[in-house]
Each structure stands twice: as structure tokens, then as C-alpha cells.
Image (spheres, coloured by chain):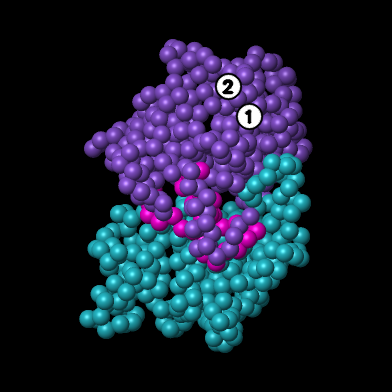
Chain colours: A cyan, B purple
Amino acid sequence: MIGEEILSVDDLTVHFSAGVTVTDRLFGKKPRVNRAVDGVDLVLKKGEVLGLVGESGSGKSTLARCIVGIYPPTSGVIRYGGEQLDTNRTRAQRTAIQMVFQDPYSSLNPLMSVEQTLSEILKYHKLVPRNKVHERCRELMYLVGLPERALEQRPRQFSGGQRQRIGIARTLALEPSVLIADEPTSALDVSIQANIINLLTDLQGTLGLSMIFVSHNMGVVRQISDRIAVMYRGCIVETNETQSLFDEPAHAYTKLLLAAVPRLITSKTGSAGEESIQR
Amino acid sequence: MTAPVLEIRDLSVEVVLPHGLLHAVRGVSLTVAPGESVAIVGESGSGKSLTLRALLGLLSRPVRASSGTILIDGVDITDLPSKQLHRKLTDTMSMIFQDPLAALNPLMRVGDQIAEVPLRRLGKSRAQAKVIALDLMTKTGLNDPEQIYGVYPHQLSGGMRQRIGIAIALSAQPRLILADEPTTALDVTTQAQVLNVLRDLQRDEYLGLLLVSHDLAVVSETCSRLYVMYGGKVVESGPVVDLINEPKHPYTFALLRSVPDPDHRVTKLIAIEGEPPDMAQPLTGCCFAPRCPFVTEKCREQEPPLGLVANAAGDAGRRSACWHVNEAQEWAAIVSEQMGDARP
């Protein structure tokens, strides 16, 4: 299933500088630079799910957004299918890499019905002939497991899990080959989370997508990823196959992260804290 | 048996909406014994946080507690005049909030915030209060308390702020600590540290702990007894380990299998289809029936009582609100086949 390289990131940095005020300039203060992403190399193969984990502030979301093209990189190169992506991407390059956002509440236009949201994309990018737009919308609803009547409704009429499905449908409308999912389940309830993970896994398999799955939840990442990259302070400290990473974490930070994950305690013996650290 | 520090009987909370009432908590009863760590687990909207808030009288309009009795040390305090009630409650318990930044006063040095209760309520002198505050800061694992005493909340990290929150909760010398999702806003490594602090304090100081969380794993590492809430009701209760090993309510059962386990990968997670119930609608039958994979006619028509479970692991005090409690073995067989990987 997993084929050749589809996306690669080479020594990518994204720096944000705090705004320089007049007084700062007067006194010649240097602007403070936040090195959100600080020299990251990453390879995504075709049909692969790469998990990107780290704590808040580790730069994983910034990296994801930079790959999609929301932020311009400060330096470094992103390649898609062997071609370097400029700041001004072609329409084909933009549609090929798409993102599922974390917050399904704020990432949908509240004034547009689901059909309007989807057909806008289909028409603008001329993905299907005009008379097939409605049919394609219905197909997309089917793909993400929503009823057809959902097309006429507005985002506020849906629950969080359903909204995230709409977000995924909107992404799939562009027929991307790379999907970047930025914590798609962290705003959802635990009982809904499994639905979305299963959906993403199914879609990834049936549509042959390559995916970068950003999350801070080690359990979720283990469930969905083929390979995992661990980020810490803007750098990737370890990359490995999922199984090997969990079995033999090499970097101290990975070990710390794995030990800190709360686990279900199924026996009464021993204090819970000690048990999780021994593992 | 000693009287429980806290007992809640049949608590109901409702929200007054323009077009009717929303029953957010529907008759919850629970107890916490001295020195016991108890957890309430549920999804958002299950009424777990409101239960805590109702208990402390922290509800504000349009939310109100419509019925319920609160007993402290076996004494009913519900009908006390509000000032005495408040005094009684705050003498017994204090609360740790989810978002430590919002719960702290941004204009006051953190040390002074901890010293405030000893100073104003316990009648200590300024110097004594400071000593107490420094001591509490050490207890909650803050290194160099002298220096941290003088800083403001925005200068601290999330984990340190939550430690300050815990220190403040301890400063009133409570016998019971209520914690409302105390680690949800924290990173996983920080979460582990804060949970350790809570667990150690609970054990060493013989404190009661009532922890509200949505995370079963967090709860299993911290608490000994568990109430599972769904749709504003307690659907299952009992010792944590037994509930996890042998759930007797389909909701607990499904919840345990829908959360990805960091130690095992399965072919497919068990998803709980459907959505949590709409609390504005009157419920007939079991509140989990619309989403339950093992639902029968009876479940839709009659509401199951929270009854004692016979012959379960950890027999004593196991309760479940399900008509089909005795078929738990069969659920497991059906589901583990679907998941493609048996969990331990």
C-alpha cells in the first residue's frame, strides 16, 4: 500500500516575531523571535499515515499549517510529488494538500448551508460539471456518513461530531491526495472521537490518501498512524514506525511522553503512578 | 461504618429556557467517605460539572437546583440559612477549577492568594499565613516557594498555576476536595505531575477527593470509586478497577472500548453511534437506549433503576441502571469479535 515519497519537508523553519513598537525601535531593541518550527525534515509516503505528536507549543500545528500553505515558511523547502512548492502555489498544488481543522465550530461558515459550502468549492475549482454538483454533494455526504437531508441544514443544527464530518466532506470535495488533520478529534467528546477516527481510517484506505495526523493524544495516534514523528520545541526529536516507537522509544522526551500518558488501571496491586512509570 | 463526609441525595438541576425546562441533572445520589477518592466520569452535557457546582451553591441563573438533599457528616444541611450553609460547606470542602488562569486573581501575587484564607478565615497573623502558604506551595511540589510567592499568575506555566490552585484549595484545611477536570487544560506530562500531587495529598493527608473528569484513564490512576454519568443520571457506580474490568452498563462498556488505548492497537474502534440525548426533551425509558447496541423493547419503554448488581466483581456497592445487567458476558463476546483484537 505504502508507495514512494509524495511530500517532503526539508530543513523547514517558521519564525514569528513579536510586533516591534515605536519605543522598541527608538531604543534599538531587537524583535523577539519565536522559533515555532526550527529546522524540520519530514517525508510522507504515498498511502501512509504519519502521526505528528507533541505538547502544546511544540510547533506541530504550525508545521501542519505551513505544509498546507497557510503560513509561509521562513526558510526551507516543501516538495510535493518532487516539485518544490513556492509561496504562490498553483491551483492544482493547493487542492492536492488539504486540511481538516481542529475546531468544527469555528471552521464552518454559519450562514451557509452544507450544500452551499460544498458546491462553492466544487464550482470554483470546476471539479465537476455544473449539472453534476448536487450529485457530487450527495456522494460526499454518503462518504462521510451523513444523511442526504443534511445538505439543506446549517452548521448550528449539527453536533460537534457531525460538524467534523462536514469539515471532512469539504476537504474531500477537492479530491486531495494529501490530508493534513490538525487534532480533528480533540474538540469532540470521547464517545464521538472513535467515530471520526474510524471514518478517517476508512477514507484513507478507500481513497488511497496520504495523511499527516497531528495530535497530542498518544492513544489516538497509535490507532491511526503507520509512522510517528515526535516534536519538541520546534524540532522533530524522533521518527519511527508506530510499533517500534511505542516498544522502544529512543529519545528521552519520547520516553517521558509515553510514561506520562494516563492508562486504565486494571489491577488493584501497586500504586497507579508507579505502575505507569515502570511500563 | 463512619458517616460519609458528603452525601448527596436525589439532586436535580434544571436550566430555565425561554421555551421550557432543560433537566440537566436528574436525581443524582452519591457519597464520599472520609479519605476516599471518588470520581464522576461523563461526557460534556452529562451533568457532572453541574452536580459539583450545585453542591457548592455556585449555580447562577438560569441554572438552578430544583431538588436534592446534601448531608455533611450525616447531617442534613439543606435547610440551613444561607450564611450557615455557606460556612458549613466551605469549612468542609474546597474546589479546584478546570482553568487555573481564570480561577486566579490576575492582580494579586499568588502567594497572597494562598495566604488569604488562613489570614481572613482561620484568624492567623500575616506572618503565620505566609508560613502556611509557603508550606502548602512546597507540598504541591513547587520548588523555590519563596520566589514564586511574589509572582503573578501570568508569569507561571499552566502546571504551576494549577499547583497554586491546589494550594489555595488546601489552605482552608478542607476534608474534601472537589476537582472539576483539574488537568484538562494541561499537557500530558504536566497532567501526570499534577495528578501525582493530588494522589499523594489525598493519601498522606487523609483527604476526601471528588474528581470530575471525562477521562477514564485519569480516573483509574487517581480514584478508588467511580460514578459514571450519562444524560444527567448515574448509570453505573462501583470500585474503579471492577468497573473497568467488568462493566455492567453498556455505556461504560462501550466507552471503555471506544477510547484508543496507547498500549494496544485494534483493527477498529467501537464507535458509539448517535448523539447524547437532548436534555430539553422528556425521556422515556433508558437514556442510553437510542445509542445502545444491545437495546430491547423494554429499554425504550421503562426506565431502569440504579440497582445493586449481584455476583459482579467487587460485589459490594456495584450498581448499574440497566435492564440487561446479567448479559454483560455476551456483550464482550460480540464486541471483541468486531474489534479484531482482544484487549486484556
Q: Does residue A43 appear left or right of residue A129 in this picture?
A: right
Q: Hey, what amino acid is under mark 2?
A: Pro
Residues under numbered marks 2 and 1 in contact, where contact means CB atoms less than 8 Å apart: no
- B107 relative to A52, above or below: above
Residue A218 image offset from top left, x and y in percent: 61, 59
- The answer to which quarter of the image holds residue A239 is bottom right
Circle number at residue B4: 2
Residue B135 image offset from top left, x and y in percent: 74, 28
- The answer to which quarter of the image holds residue B218 is top right
Secondary structure beneath dot 1 equals loop
Q: Main secondary structure of the magenta part?
A: loop
The chain holding disc 2 is B
Residue B69 image offset from top left, x and y in percent: 44, 21
Q: Does residue B295 appear left or right of residue A252 in this picture?
A: left
At x 69%, y 63%, the residue is A246
Q: Quick one: quadrant of the N terminus of chain B? A: top right
Q: Quick one: quadrant of the C terminus of chain B? A: bottom right
